[in-house]
Amino acid sequence: MKITDIRIFVTCPGRNFVTVKIYTDEGLTGVGDATLNGRELAVASYLKDHVAPCLIGRDALCSEDIWHYLYRGAYWRRGPVTMASIAGIDTALWDIRAKAAGMPLYQLLGGASRDRVLCYTHAQGTGISEAVVAVGARIDEGYLAIRAQVGIPGLPDIYGTGVSGLTNTASDNATPREEMWSTSKYLPRIPRLFEALRAAHGEEVHLLHDVHHRLSPIEAARLGKDLEPFRLFWLEDAVPAENQEGFRVVRQHTTTPLAVGEVFNTVWDAKLLIEEQLIDFIRTTCVHAGGPTALRRIMDFAGLHHVRTACHGAADMSPICLGANLHLDLWVPNFGIQEYSGYTEEMLSLFPHAWSFSGGYLHPGEAHGHGVDFDESHADEYPYQPAYLPVNRLEDGTLWHW
Ligand code: CS2
Ligand code: MG
């Protein structure tokens, strides 16, 4: 089955998504997500200018060889732009393979290891009482696991605590918004949030919190310890993870479970974290970690070391990424949880999908392939809009992590 054409679409149905569509001489097509939030056009150019021309005429069923052709063959390995590009191609090729086999993708991976996929969603508030109400509303919608974030007095407008994260976060002139950060204001606030959440909503609901890489190891260790009475499902991205050894300090001091990896691109980014069992959940996801070919290897490696999976699933990855993740989630023996922050109706109309949500769980559906399509006939109605993630500065102006 020969690849006859590869088209790249950058659309903005509320957020920018990069979509790869591969066409074959047998009429089968497949779609993949290659979105890299805030850097979409770089990936689109990598794909259009450097990848697509090299793949025309190749066998669409040789996805393993194509993966290595794009990874080893480029000489310049890893990195988010390269790996999102490879992911877009790889996801589309797995979609084609599963359609050719007449099966949902999870059947090709080894079949379902569970009936349904536990997911968590987001709830936030600028104040603690608002966050408590927001978590309650999510529980009423049927969610069993909820990530809770709260604003910090004295720090205006922190990412993830105010308005919904479903839409683009660009300021009017399309340069990154600047936010302000203070660890000393943040650290005492978060245990108070979870104390209030447990008091209001009881022990049963799974509660999670995302630190967004803003702490040092010893600060993260303190936060993990302070949160122990509230039994979090996890503390996410507690410290920047370029220095994997930094997690040793956090791990030695707290029994709060740790999750990391949404910005990782390959297994090499998590090798020490997994081998030394410094984390409990690995957050690599289809689009940023090189597609199903690479992600399932990371998942298997994690399984050897008591680390469970937790694919990143925020709304800045397209519904195709979520659809592909759900097939891996249904199959993977060491499954943990799937993030699911949802999509707007507009987004879902551009990406018709077979997955379903019920009672706190997702299921990828039984459509052949990964079950998510792209309605290219409407692509022109949603042109790319320049948009960036915000940047973060300390109160004295120092540029900080987030
Ligand atoms: C977050 C994301 O979902 C998460 O856990 O960390 O919202 C993240 O900020 C975005 O995906 C960045 O593009
Ligand atoms: Mg996160």
Image (cartoon, rainbow, N blue to C red):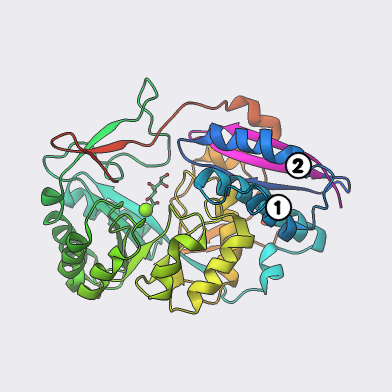
* Residue 144 magenta-highlighted: no
Q: Position of residue 377 (x, y in %)?
A: 71, 31
Total labels drawn: 2
Numbered range of the magenta stretch: 1-23
Of the residues shown, which amino acid type is indicated by label 1? Answer: Tyr
Q: CA distance from mark 2 to mark 1?
A: 10 Å
* Nearest to the observer: residue 239 or residue 361: 239
Residue 252 vs 381, above or below: the answer is: below
Disc on the earlier residue, 2 or 1: 2
Q: Position of residue 233 (x, y in %)?
A: 32, 69
Residue drawn at (43%, 30%) of the image: 387
**How many C-alpha atoms fall within 10 Å of the one at disc 2: few (<14), some, or many (≥20)?**
some
The answer to which image quadrant residue 221 occupies is bottom left
Q: Position of residue 183 (x, y in %)?
A: 15, 50
Residue drawn at (60%, 35%) of the image: 44
Cβ atoms at labels 2 and 1 below 8 Å apart:
yes
* Residue 375 visible in the current orientation: no
The residue to which callout 1 is attached is 69
Q: Secondary structure at mark 1?
A: helix
Q: Spot the residue most to the front.
A: 75
* Residue 287 visible in the current orientation: yes
Residue drawn at (58%, 28%) of the image: 382
Residue 289 image label: none
Q: Is mark 2 within 8 Å of ligand 1?
A: no
The residue to which callout 2 is attached is 54
Q: Is residue 363 left or right of residue 52?
A: left
* Nearest to the observer: residue 111 or residue 273: 273
Q: Position of residue 188 (x, y in %)?
A: 11, 57
* Residue 4 magenta-highlighted: yes
